[in-house]
Image: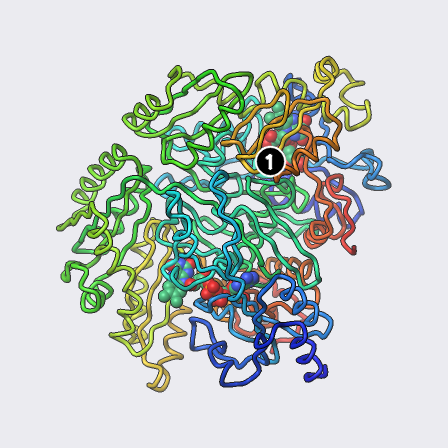
């Protein structure tokens, strides 16, 4: 391709200043939240309208330029990391709330709108948008759709896929797909569910219709402190098993609690081996019943301290620690690496013990802060990239942790996505036939593989190389394929 | 209670190799028992595609299709009550699933049609039909955590898993819900379960259709233990589920007649209310242009439908959109409507459009003909081995 000519076409199609090519100005786009993976983009386009998005896609298609959609760049798996020689298509300027439709309890928004901005915009109507990733201040709804993001309240209210009713998607082939609407379950293949979590590989989301829920009239947050991980995990399993689904149920281990206390002073008991944070919501009557039940359950499970927050200020205090957990880690370690495996809730103790054994073996501390209610672990591996070999150790340890999750019947990523990061682990979780099926789905949307190439789905040859490929019945798949 | 997976995979593989076409049948294997409304099931006929039969020709013509019964591949594989997760083979009868879950005070959140208990779990997932509680309890696809399936190439594939959150690879498991078996035959599914509510009651009050819709929308904006709403023929039914005190308080606010009889909701779920009469069997017969069930005299649906001459439409739309004129059942807090009308199809579609929705004939499977859908079909089943009668789109458009 003639680079100058293509840049010129892009520049003409976009408003002044919306095409960045200066290396210094492109630096912020080198990486997403997983800063260990960097790549300088060829150019960055910041369209401000759907037409401009379409125009940029058309140029990339006809010129064969690969492109990477990008929201706020808070992703933790390198999904928005640029690809060499490729365009970054930043959606941050498409940031308008197009419609708040109170009667239908939906909001129609552009993809660059921040997650929290939706709830703020509809609060006056007593409504909110339920999925609340910890990054909600910054992350975009388009990125949420692409990652099928979760949050603390997803235990009761579901993930992004459960709370999005409609999508407008531009394909690289030049089609506009209008999926779903303001109601539920429009007939036809559920492309909306397919797009959720597709990591910018199948299309560019240009509009999202989200479902709004009524704010619960009453909320209570309980903090229960335990002397052992087993006791805390036991309380989680019992609560879910008895059919009580709290709005959120989070766990932090000793290292996480201590680091957080130093940083945020939320009043967490420093001597706890593990704490649970449990939010209950609903009608006043319902919350009263649930709260009495939960307190009794925690006591029976061995909690030695229970704090209860009834008013907004106290609730904010208890959540403050949890929300500060990531930055707090940044204080006690030069770098940390956040993992995202999900396991059956009954395997919590087994897997956490396994993680702690691995942590000793690799000589790197691991803190655990996670969505216990859905079995979604976030082991934070603490390391120092300036020490030779530590980054590699951290990555190797992370890989081992994810293998442990798969072995326990779980998955290598619950909510952060595969991105550029977990391609090798995908080879552990899927066999060649599944990977080939993923490829054919990709091809149905993007036959030239221009959208976010090299992410999310590993190639068969890569899997053969890392040796993680499943071998069925002792038979090597594709025996004639080159191994490199 | 058998594991027939290997045989099913082989059946698909061989059909592909020999250029044969298969129609997946869930409970159709229990054919010949003449179960009333399920006439066309009994005759082993698949449900109609929304597209006229003319489109089906050559090897896709109904006569060239063989059935592939999957109902024998049955049995619960794993139920972990403390995880709220069930994994079962797709031929498992819904009534068996229900009975097992009830012992643990759990249920399938999406309330599929039970069809006298004979419907299969795979059929429920494949059709993706969610029951009266959909807006509150989620849809079939919402509950899908993972599937094992065989695609049209005869490959046995596993997507998703048994855990609550999973974004590894594209979500090809949820995609199977509502795909009617046209992307593959499901072998087993893992589903998220929900606890049964402590108490469940029905409130019934007389009102106009517009009043009913207005209330439904008001309630949707407030927090309440409502778990289903249904309006038809001057009566509004509201299902309340939750702790006793919350249910009582809500019932007092709503007013009307409170009852513990929940028969209305199972009848709605099973299409057994009067507005549905003649659907299930008659529609399929009508689609086949008077052949099939009607001529064979299976079921009484055609006759009933002929009596009032009106078709039944299912409309998924913006919940607050104004109602259509005439006989209409409104559920899902307004988001799903069943409209019995003589209006020509163009008028029905025009109405659906004004309601930001889509209308389909109640007895028809959806069509999967849009170009992108045709391409997906091709991605899973390039030789069109499985349920080819449901998609006729051109992938190269
Ligand atoms: C009153 C009423 C009447 C109905 N009448 C009909 C009718 O006449 N014909 C009809 O087809 N549906 C009908 N349905 C809809 C639908 O088939 C049922 O609701 C479904 O859940 C029944 O399950 P089944 O096991 O009997 O599946 P089936 O009726 O055998 O199959 C339904 C659809 O799912 C597919 N399917 C079944 N099992 C699998 C599997 N394991 N993997 C992949 N795909 C699978 C089939 O190919 C078919 O497309 C009716 C529903 C109601 C409530
Ligand atoms: C401190 C911190 C806490 C976090 N907490 C959580 C949490 O609790 N739960 C959770 O799930 N995640 C969490 N994350 C991860 C991250 O915030 C989410 O994945 C978020 O959804 C990413 O949104 P973004 O706008 O930043 O997307 P980006 O990082 O810009 O992009 C993410 C992916 O989406 C694609 N993409 C972005 N926009 C579009 C679009 N419009 N169309 C198509 N594809 C697009 C990109 O190509 C990329 O593959 C956290 C991250 C941080 C840094």
Q: Nearer the viewer, residue B228 or A397?
A: B228
Give percent across and percent down for residue B293: 76, 21
Residue at far right of view: B58
Residue denoted by label 1: B316
Q: Is residue A463 visible?
A: no
Whether B145 is drawn above or below A111: the answer is above
Whether B390 is drawn above or below A478: the answer is above
Q: Is residue B50 visible?
A: yes
* Mark 1 secondary-structure assignment: strand
Total count of labels:
1
Q: Nearer the viewer, residue B176 or A310?
A: A310
Chain identity of mark 1: B
Task: Name which quarter of the figure residue B91 lies in.
Answer: top right
Task: Name which quarter of the figure residue A176 lies in.
Answer: bottom right
Give percent across and percent down for residue A275: 22, 55
- Which residue occupies 57% across, 32% down? B336
Q: Nearer the viewer, residue B66 or A423?
A: A423
Q: Does residue A425 appear left or right of residue A225 in this picture?
A: right
- Which residue occupies 40% across, 74% down? A396
Q: Quadrant of ligand 1?
A: top right
Point out the image quarter for the C terminus of chain A: bottom right
Q: Residues within 10 Å of mark 1 (few under 14, many from 20)?
A: many
Point out the image quarter for the N terminus of chain A: bottom right
Whether B158 is drawn above or below B195: the answer is below
Whether B333 is drawn above or below A225: the answer is above
């Amino acid at each position: 391709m003639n680079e100058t000519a293509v840049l010129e076409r892009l520049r003409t199609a976009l408003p002044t200043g919306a095409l960045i090519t200066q290396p210094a100005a492109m630096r912020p786009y080198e990486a997403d939240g997983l800063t260990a993976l960097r790549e300088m983009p060829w150019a960055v386009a910041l369209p401000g309208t759907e037409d401009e998005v379409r125009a940029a896609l058309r140029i990339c298609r006809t010129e064969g330029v690969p492109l990477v959609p990008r929201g706020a760049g808070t992703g933790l798996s390198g999904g928005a990391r640029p690809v060499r020689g490729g365009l970054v298509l930043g959606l941050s300027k498409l940031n308008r709330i197009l419609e708040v439709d109170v009667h239908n309890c939906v909001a129609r928004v552009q993809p660059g709108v921040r997650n929290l901005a939706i709830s703020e915009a509809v609060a006056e109507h007593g409504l909110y948008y339920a999925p609340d990733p910890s990054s909600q201040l910054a992350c975009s709804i388009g990125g949420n759709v692409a990652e099928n993001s979760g949050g603390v309240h997803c235990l009761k209210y579901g993930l992004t896929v459960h709370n999005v009713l409609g999508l407008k998607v531009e394909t690289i082939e030049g089609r506009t797909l209008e999926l779903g609407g303001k109601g539920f379950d429009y007939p036809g293949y559920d492309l909306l569910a397919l797009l959720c979590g597709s990591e910018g590989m199948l299309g560019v989301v240009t509009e999202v219709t989200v479902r709004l829920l009524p704010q619960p009239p009453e909320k209570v947050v309980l903090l229960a402190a335990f002397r052992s991980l087993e006791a805390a995990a036991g309380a989680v399993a019992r609560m879910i098993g008895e059919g009580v689904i709290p709005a959120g149920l989070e766990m932090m281990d000793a290292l996480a609690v201590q680091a957080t206390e130093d940083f945020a002073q939320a009043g967490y008991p420093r001597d706890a081996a593990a704490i649970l944070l449990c939010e209950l919501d609903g009608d006043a009557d319902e919350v009263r019943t649930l709260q009495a039940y939960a307190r009794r359950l925690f006591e029976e499970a061995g909690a030695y301290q229970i704090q209860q927050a009834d008013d907004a200020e106290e609730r904010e205090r208890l959540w403050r620690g949890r929300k500060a957990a990531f930055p707090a880690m940044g204080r006690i370690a030069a770098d940390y690496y956040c993992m995202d495996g999900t396991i059956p809730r009954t395997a919590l103790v087994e897997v956490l013990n396994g993680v702690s054994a691995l942590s000793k073996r690799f000589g790197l501390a691991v803190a655990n802060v996670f969505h216990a209610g859905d079995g979604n672990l976030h082991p934070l591996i603490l390391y120092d990239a300036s020490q030779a070999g530590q980054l590699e150790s951290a990555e190797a340890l992370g890989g081992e942790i994810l293998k442990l999750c798969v072995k326990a019947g779980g998955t290598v990523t619950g909510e952060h996505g595969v991105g550029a990061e977990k391609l090798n682990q995908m080879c552990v979780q899927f066999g060649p036939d599944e990977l080939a099926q993923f490829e054919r789905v990709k091809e149905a949307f993007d036959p030239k593989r221009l959208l976010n190439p090299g992410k999310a789905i590993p190639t068969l040859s890569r899997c053969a190389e890392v040796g993680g490929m499943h071998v069925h019945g002792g038979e090597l798949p594709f025996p004639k394929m080159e191994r490199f | 209670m058998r594991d027939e997976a290997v045989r099913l995979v082989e059946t698909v593989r061989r059909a592909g190799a020999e250029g044969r076409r298969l129609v997946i049948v869930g409970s159709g294997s229990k054919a010949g028992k003449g179960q009333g409304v399920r006439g066309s099931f009994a005759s082993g006929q698949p449900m109609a595609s929304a597209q006229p039969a003319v489109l089906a020709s050559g090897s896709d013509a109904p006569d060239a299709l063989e059935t592939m019964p999957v109902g024998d591949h049955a049995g619960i594989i794993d139920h972990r009550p403390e995880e709220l997760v069930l994994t079962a083979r797709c031929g498992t009868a819904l009534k068996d699933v229900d009975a097992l879950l009830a012992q643990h005070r759990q249920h399938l959140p999406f309330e599929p049609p039970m069809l006298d208990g004979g419907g299969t779990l795979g059929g429920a997932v494949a059709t993706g039909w969610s029951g009266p509680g959909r807006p509150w309890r989620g849809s079939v696809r919402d509950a899908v955590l993972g599937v094992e399936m065989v695609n049209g190439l005869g490959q046995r594939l596993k997507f998703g898993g048994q855990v609550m959150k999973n974004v590894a690879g594209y979500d090809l498991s949820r995609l199977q819900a509502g795909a009617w078996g046209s992307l593959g035959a499901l072998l087993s599914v893992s589903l998220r379960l929900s606890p049964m509510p402590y108490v469940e009651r029905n409130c019934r009050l007389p009102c106009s259709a517009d009043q009913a819709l207005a209330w439904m929308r008001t309630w949707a904006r407030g927090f309440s233990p409502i778990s289903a709403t249904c309006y038809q023929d001057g009566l509004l039914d509201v299902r309340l589920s939750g702790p006793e005190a919350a249910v009582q308080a809500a019932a007092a606010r709503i007013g009307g007649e409170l009852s513990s009889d929940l028969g209305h909701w199972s009848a709605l779920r099973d299409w057994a209310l009067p507005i549905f009469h003649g659907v299930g069997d008659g529609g399929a017969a009508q689609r086949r242009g008077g052949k099939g069930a009607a001529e064979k005299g299976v079921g009484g649906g055609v006759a009933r439908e002929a009596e009032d001459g009106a078709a039944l439409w299912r409309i998924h739309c913006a919940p607050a959109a104004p109602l259509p004129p005439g006989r209409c059942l409104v559920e899902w807090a307004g988001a799903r409507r069943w409209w019995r009308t003589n209006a020509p199809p163009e008028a029905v579609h025009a109405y659906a459009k004004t309601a930001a929705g889509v209308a389909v004939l109640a007895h028809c499977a959806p069509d999967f003909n849009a170009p992108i859908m045709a391409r997906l079909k091709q991605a899973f089943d390039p030789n069109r081995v499985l349920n080819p009668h449901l998609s006729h789109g051109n992938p190269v458009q």
